[in-house]
Structures are given as structure tokens and as C-alpha cells.
Amino acid sequence: MLMFSYLMATGITTGAFYALVALGIVIVYKSTEVVNLAHGDLFMVGGMLAYTCYVMGGIPYLPSLLLAVAGAFVVGILTERVAYRSVLKHGLASVLVATIGVSFVLKGIGRYIWGGKGDYLAFPPIVSPEPLQFGNIMIMSQQLVVLFAVIVVMAALALFFKRTRAGKWMQATASNPKAAMLCGLRIDRIYMYTFAVGAALAGAAGVLMAPLTHLYPDVGFVLFIKGMAAAVLGGLTSIPGAVLGGVLLGLAEQLAAGYLHSSFQDVVAFLVIMFALIFLPTGLLGARGLRKV
Amino acid sequence: MTLPVLVGNRSFLALLFGVLLALPAFANQYTLFVGNLMLLYIILALGLNILVGFAGLLAFANAAIYGIGAYGTALLQVHLGWSFWAAAPVGAVLAMLIGTLLAFPALRLSGIFLALATLAFAQATQWVLWHWQSVTFGAGGFRVPPPDFGWIPVKQDYGIYFVSWAVTLGLLLFTWRIMRSRIGRAFVAMRDGEIAAQSLGIDLLTYKAMAFALSSFYAGVAGALYSGLLGFVSPEAFDLFQMIIQKAMIVVGGLGSVVGSVLGAALLVYVMEVLREFKSTQEIVFGALLIAFMVFQPHGLVVFMKRWLPGWEEPLHLAGGVQSTAPGHDTSVAGATSKEHASAERT
């Protein structure tokens, strides 16, 4: 029972983190119908920028976080302007190929700048590294920070989509780009900011997660797969779905690792993607009645 | 008619394969290795182009299938003591069988979703290669005995080179014929509009399975030759970066063009070898090539060849983006068929 509750606690905290990665993927997909395969590498860029500011530059943590998020936002804008905008007219699959190109360019740049200093960069903990005791479960305090941050980001996104004009523009563009354009929305600009917001979210996830996972140039794709699995499970278009999918994925991984074998932890995400896409194409909370697959 | 034949795609292929055949006469061991690698990548690019360029199925599993071919061949030799000549065909067929299974998700999924599912399949394959240590020897890889050329008096690396050359030429001619046959036209019809193809009597399951089977057979053959060439296999040779290299080859060469695959593979193997020492530069260059071609010339280098060389025929070249099931592709369908008629009249 102790092991079970420990696995549940770890599952929920790692799941919250997967949810944070998934949220970025979902937001981009919701308004552009593009799955950004470079999302994980934007995550890596965010983490590396925070490392540069915080560890190498000696800037305090919060400003480092903001700088890294802003940096990721700018990278997101750049990638959209350079790589995606002119490819969008050739169809979504072409954009997918472009995003994987961007993914490798970012990874190569990451390896070029930050890869030479030992394979893994250790990010010092920002809160006390002592685990906290709840009853008889131990939880890393950094995991609680991530959990808290996910709740904040999700609430902020919900508010953004419900209350702000920019959020409504994005939703309008998502549901019908042509009609949105006829209403006078500049959809290319909205796409640009969507990619940038997705990138900023990836950057934020990178900064928050850096103390828990070491940073290395290839970290992005591993996390992209997990975030993707969470997003697909949740239905790819639903923000609560992404969070639910993330938590379920985290729990499934921990249970597989705890009760089967520790190496099974990584394979869960692949299986979830394959089976969810084939048997549950709208996910758990995705839009019903639309055949997009 | 004589001049176009001299400066067309056929003469390009004849020249390339002639040079490659003569290569062992004057090349050192390293150049020979690069030449051999070029042959393997031509096979891989042809196979991937059948799937992505002709049949319009954007899949990301080719590197994993390539790995299954290589591992199948190598493991049969190491565990069961088979000779290379027995193991290689079995490895290639094994890769083909596993690859064909991917046609079933492809029936339900299209575009981005097929890409994601096959990406997950590729990563799962990597996971198996890493963790099933009792069979695959894990992340470090393992050594394979070199192919035995006891029955002909030829040095080992020359032997595998000539085998690769012959196999590549055979597969190239086979691709050339089959893509101009009923099957190739069915692939192109499927790519340009699934519903239209279905209503013309093209059975989607059969032809999708056939596209996956063909492309994974090519990847399996390349994998088998790779294990014979290198004498060593490890999971990281078949990772996502390998996939990007192959994808860049067909995008640079030209989607839906047999000669484009050859052109892209030959060029990018050269680029890859120039940058071999710097993994970060390789990643940046291949990523940037993909982006640049997607932005500036999504139809690949073949477009320039068609424009400049009078004898360069490309009846089935993909004239839209990667996937032309988007609305407004009718013109490209009409264009492709009219060009096809033109070429049929000429021949």
C-alpha cells in the first residue's frame, strides 16, 4: 500500500509536468492544426537559456525564468516567420516536415552551444532539495513547485481563452480560418503568436523541470513524446483533456515501472500514442463528431 | 529524339552507376566505403519515396524498419550461426512483414496522425533494441562476422560493394518499372485524392499495404547490406536522426521522383561525409535543408532538372506539397495526368 501511494504521488506530479508539455502542443494544434514536432526542442532551449542566466550568469531564479520564457517566445516567433509561414500554404503535412527540420536545427544549435560542457548539465535545485513528508509519502519539493505551476498555467490559459480578445481571436481562427479572416482577423499574425505562446509554454516547462531532469541537447524529443502522448490521450484539442491525459500518463508510467519493470516506464508513452490514435481518435475529452483523423 | 536522351534522367543514372561500378578501380578504402554508403542510401531513399512521395503516406518509421533489417540479419548470424547469404534475405523479409503491419493504422490515420503513430512505432522499436538485452545486446551494439566470399576470389570490402551495386541497380530498375505500372499509378491516385482513387476502383487497403511492404522491403535490404558493410550494429544508427537524413534526401531530390531519390541520396551522403566529425553541424545542416526546401522548393531539385535538361521525364512527380489531399489540388491531378499522356505518346 505504501508503494502504491508513493507511486500515485509521483505519478501525479510527473503527470502534471507532462500536462505542462502537452498544453503547449494542444494550444498550437488547436489554432493551427499543426503538431509542432519542435516543441520538445523549444523546451530544451528554455531550459538551456535558464541555465545560462541562472548558473552561468548568476541572475536570480525568477528573472532567469522570465528571461528564458521570453527567449523561447522569441525563438517561437522566429521559427514561425522563417520556417512555417510560407510552408502553411502547401498543406499541413509539409509544415510537419518543416517542424521536424526546426527541431533538428534547434537540437544542433543546443549541442553546439551547450553540449560541450559535459554531457549532462545539472541545474541546481531552486527550492530545498529535502523531500517533504506527507503522512508516510515522500515528495520532492520541486515536484510540488511543478504541480503548482501547472495549475497556475492552466488557470491562466483558461482565462486567456475565455476572457481576452486575443484568446477569442485564436479560437475563432482555430474553428474557421477563412471566416476569421473575413471578419478582419489577421490570421497569419495570430498563427505567429500561437506558435510563440506554445514556445513560451515549452520554455516555461523547461525552466521548471530543469532541476528535476538534467539538461542535455536530446532531452527535448523524449519529453515531446510524453507530452504528445498526454495530448493525444486528452484529445489534442482540449486543455482540460491535456491535463487529464498528462496525469493518466504519469500514473500509468509509475504503475508500469513499479509493478512490471523499471524499463517499462518509457514504453508506456509510445503505446499510448499508437493505441489512442487508432482506437480513441478523439481522445478522452476531444471534440466529438468531427472526423479529423 | 537523340539529343534529349543524351541529357536526360536515363543518361544521368547510367553515368552515376557507371562511375560507381568503376569506383573500386581507383578509390581508396574510405572512398569505397562512402560509395557503398551512397548505394545503401539510394535504396533507402527509393523505398521511402515510394511511401511518401508516390503513395503520399507520411510515415516516420523507415529508420526503424532499416534497423529491423540490419538487426534481423545480424542476429540470425550471431545467435543461430547462419551465413550472411542466408540471413540477409530473411532479415529483409522480416523487415517487410513488420513494415506491412503499419498499413493497418494507415487505413484509419492520415497526414499528421499517421506521422505521429509511426513516430511512436519508431521510438518503440528503439526501446526494444535498447532494453531487450538478452537478444539485441542493448545500447552498445555488437559485432557481426563479415560476409563470406569464399566462393569467389574477391576481397571482403570489394565483395560487399559489388553486391550492393548490383542490388541497388536491380531495385532502381524495379522501382522505375513498377512506378510506371498500374501499381505506381494507383499509388499516385491515392496520394492525389483517396476518395477519388477509391471510387476509381483502387482498393486502399491493398495498395497501402503494398506501399508499406515495398518501402519496408527496400529498407530491410538496405539494413541487411549495412550490417554486412559495417560488421557492427547498434541502436543509435537507426534513430530519429537517421529518419531525418532519409527524409531530407527525398525532399531535396524530389518527392514522387525515382531519379530524384537517387539524386538526393547521392548528394546528401556527400554532405553527411563532409560533416561527419561534427554531429551538431550535421543536425543543423540537415534540419536547415529540410526547412529550406520546404520553403523555397518543396518539389525538390528535380524541378530544376526538368527545366534545364530536355530529356528529363518526371511523369509522376509530386506537384503539390507533401500531401495534396488539401482542397484545390485538382489542377495538380489534371497536370500529372496530362503529362503522363504526353510521355505515353512519346514512348
Image: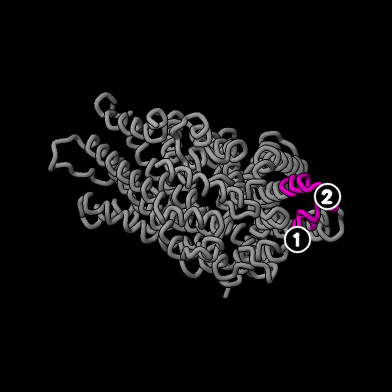
Are there few (<14), some (14-19), or many (20+) residues within 10 Å of tag 2?
some
Mark 2 or mark 1: name the one nearer the start of the chain.
1
Question: Is residue B130 positioned above or below B294 on the image?
Answer: below
Q: Is residue A157 above or below residue B296?
A: below
Q: Which mark is residue A123?
A: none
Percent x, y of residue B76: 26, 55
Q: What segment is highlighted magenta in the picture?
A: A172-197
Q: Which label number is shown at residue A185?
A: 2
Magenta residue check for A184: yes
Residue B215, position as x, y percentages in the image: 40, 52
Viewer-side residue, A137 vs B96: B96
At a point 29% along the width and 25% down the height, the residue shown is B27
Out of A208 and B304, give the one closest to the viewer.
B304
Mark 1: give few (<14), some (14-19) or many (20+) Cα within 10 Å: some
The structure residue drawn at horizontal position 77% and vertical position 41%, both measured from the top left corner, is A63
Would residue A271 be visible to someone looking at this image? no
**Residue reaching furthest to the front:** B345
**Percent coordinates x, y for residue B77 in the rendering:** 24, 52
Cα distance in 3D space between marks 2 and 1: 30 Å
Q: Main secondary structure of the magenta part?
A: helix
The C terminus of chain B sits in image quarter: top left
Nearer to me, B79 or B16? B16
Residue identifier under label 1: A151
Q: Is residue B6 above or below residue B327?
A: above
For the residue marked with disc 2, what is the amino acid?
Leu
Residue A286: % across, % down:
68, 67
